[in-house]
Image: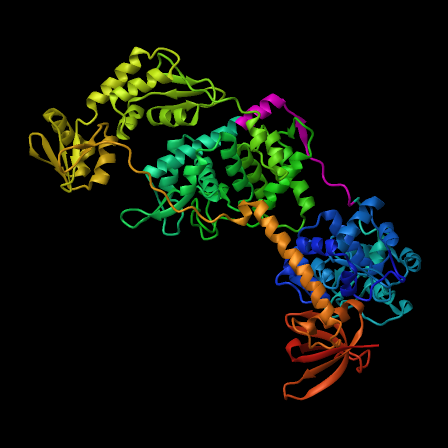
Amino acid sequence: MGPGPNGHRSLADQLRSWPDERLQRLLAARPDLATPAPHDFGQLASRAAVRNSIARTLDGLTRGELSVLDALVVAGQTTESELISILSADPAYVAAAVARLMDLALAWESPEGLRALTGVADSMLGGGEAGVSGLRPRSAGRRDLVELEPVIAALPVEARALLDHVVASGGTAKPGTARIGLQPENTETPAELLIAHRLLLPGGSLQPGLLMAPGEVGLVLRGGRTTTTPIDEPPPLAAEARSPRLAQGAAVGAATDVVRRTETLLEWWGVRPAAALRTTGLGVRELKATATYLQVSDAVAALLVEVATEAGLLGTRADSDGNPVWVPTEQFDLWRELPTAEKWSVLARAWLTSARLPSLVGERGPDQKQWNALTPELSASGMPEAKAMALAALAELPEGHGLAAGTGLPSLVARVAWERPRRPRTRPDLVAWAITEAAVIGVTGADVLAPFGRVLVAGDDPAPALASVLPPPVDHVLIQADLTAVAPGPLEPDLARRLNQVADIESHGAATVYRFTPDSVRRGLDVGWTAAELHAFLLAASRTPVPQPLSYLIDDVVRSFGRLRVGVASSFIRSEDEAALAGLIGDPRAVGLGLQRIAPTVLVSNVPIDVLLPRLRDLGVAPVVEGPDGVVRVGAAEPLRARSPRTRDAADPARAAARQSTHVVTAVRSLREGDEEARNRPASASAPGGGVLSALREAIERRGVVLIGFTDNQGVVSERAVAPLAVEGGRLTARDQDADADDPDAERTYAVHRISRVVPVG
């Protein structure tokens, strides 16, 4: 690779020479180049040089790859062997990095040598600041390093110290009172001496009013290298060995837990919808109620709610009063019939591709307002990448190894920072949240990537891998005399669902412990269980005899259940037990209910029935609803459902990949057809699809001169020979070839829309 007959006249020519497969890889890696499909290779090369497109592509490079590109910018144009000589890296790494940069059209092979694409320097330097290495591009004269070494070696101590400081500080300095244009023997200060030896040069249009140390000076100071440390060594992860059995057990337990709790939550919200905020978010009170119901922290409850929504299992609809509420979608009914492993696969995939930030729920934003779960603004585009990269780093660890306690997470943050050094400052938080959430979801256990988690990270379906390590479901429990029931393994879905209606989960693990309480039994009666059905269910579900205390508990709750009957008056309370009504009126906690006795067995209230019922239950009584005909209304309410959302491409990687592949193939075909048509057009810029920009950017790449035809403000059409320097913001910056070299007005700007034709000169 290098100067000679193998070079190309322009980037467009190089792209034109590529086979279709390589073009497809380019468009897949830089999808903005293919939308809409470019008309010809000139337009493709023009798009590749747009600053925003370059910046997006740079964001996907590692620190090592950026260092190679930075060295190419510093060198200006060079050969691969020369590039290897100025980099602290293994030659094979540099060669691979150069190949990737060329595949991304960030570098191309000109007849004079390997060059960075025009615009890369500005995107990397960030408006004049130093790049990855801290060095600036070499000067236009490209002074030889051998020539500079004795000059720098002979500098006085003060001048050498000043030069070292300027290079270490990014390569710029203010001239102050230093005079410019002196011979070395006439200088009086260290700065003037450096300027006289051209070790500091005027910043020009890039940095007006400043002095800059050219790249070759920095190379000499660093012994001919752009960096003083190796660029091809990513930071190691701090890891330690863990018990494989313990790690896998923790991951499996978390995975089954997430599935069970998600199902429990959505079934609950199907009959008792959660009110949605005006912003469609979930209120603090609703989140806390959810956390209490699921027996988890607010943070875990927020994560479960967010993941269920991302998986398409949760949505909004209007309730009977027209208010928006959160309820399960129609998709939930299909999901809950799946095996546990497949249920988890749906949730895990949704989590992995989600940009949501449930870890911020409860925190305050810049406006000091508290973040709510399901708020649309609570997301970050970098979150999916942070998850993928953090888990990919864990996948590199040997089997049975996880992040070391204390130092593991900082080392993971450093690794991800090396992989994507241009990403936002919030990266440490994103990585930390990703690891925390992965443990809750069950992708990891004890900070070790689970076997089925590795399958997930690889992009395959993790359900078979998880199913192979899940214990078989059991169809029974062991009821004990202390009013608990032990499930010796994961229960069959129907048994677990029914048991959750009449018992509370006390502890999780290999064996789940359920506890029967008056409240849990009353909850079963509220949804339609009868005493006979409860006794029969427990007798059939338990492998041990039903203890007498549990039978007594059920009978006691049944006797008190329905003692009070609530109706609409706004509401009324009726009971044959006059003492119970008297006790209720005398209860100081019932003052706010507006109770009034209108008969020995009837009370009325000015509180609506939907408020009165839960308030009475809070007081420890167990009312039931009585209809207008006097019949008690007990039974399970018809669950509410929202319409299932359309499947997002992000949640279906296979669909997204297929769509992108088809688009790329179509774009390449369009390129070939458009290029054939372009061969029959003149090199002027009359071609559709931005021929002016394509011709100008091609001239910039080959550093050529063009004849432009443009219309001035008076409508006069004229021609001028110029050397294009940059195209940005709809304006061309070019050097007038007819102006004197020292003319400060030699660089001029032209509105691109006023340029009618561009013809190469020579």
Residue 411 found in image quarter: top right
| Residue 311 seen by the camera | yes
Q: Residue at x 71, y 79 (%)?
A: 757
Q: Is residue 297 visible?
A: no
Residue situated in front as seen by the camera: 491 or 396: 491
Who's the residue at 51% across and 44% down the image? 357
Locate the C terminus by quadrant.
bottom right
Q: Residue furthest left?
A: 599
Residue 118 spot, x, y in % from top left: 75, 64
Q: Position of residue 567 (x, y in %)?
A: 16, 37
10 or 306, which is in the foreground?
Answer: 10
- Please indicate whether residue 451 sits to the left or right of residue 368 in the image: right
| Quadrant (top left, top right, bottom left, bottom right) of the N terminus | bottom right
Residue 237 located within the stretch drawn in magenta = yes
- For the image, the number of numbered tags is 0
Residue range of the region highlighted in magenta in the rendering: 231-252
Query: Where residue 515 appears, x then y in whole percent?
Result: 36, 20
* Side of 39 where 642 appears, left or right: left
662 over 642 or under it: above or below: below
Q: Is residue 513 above or below residue 370?
A: above
- Seen in the picture, residue 665 relative to 391 is either above or below; the reply is below
The image's colour scheme reads rainbow
Residue 472, image x and y in percent? 51, 22
Quarter of the figure with residue 469: top right
Magenta span has 460?
A: no
Above or below — where is 178 with respect to 441?
below
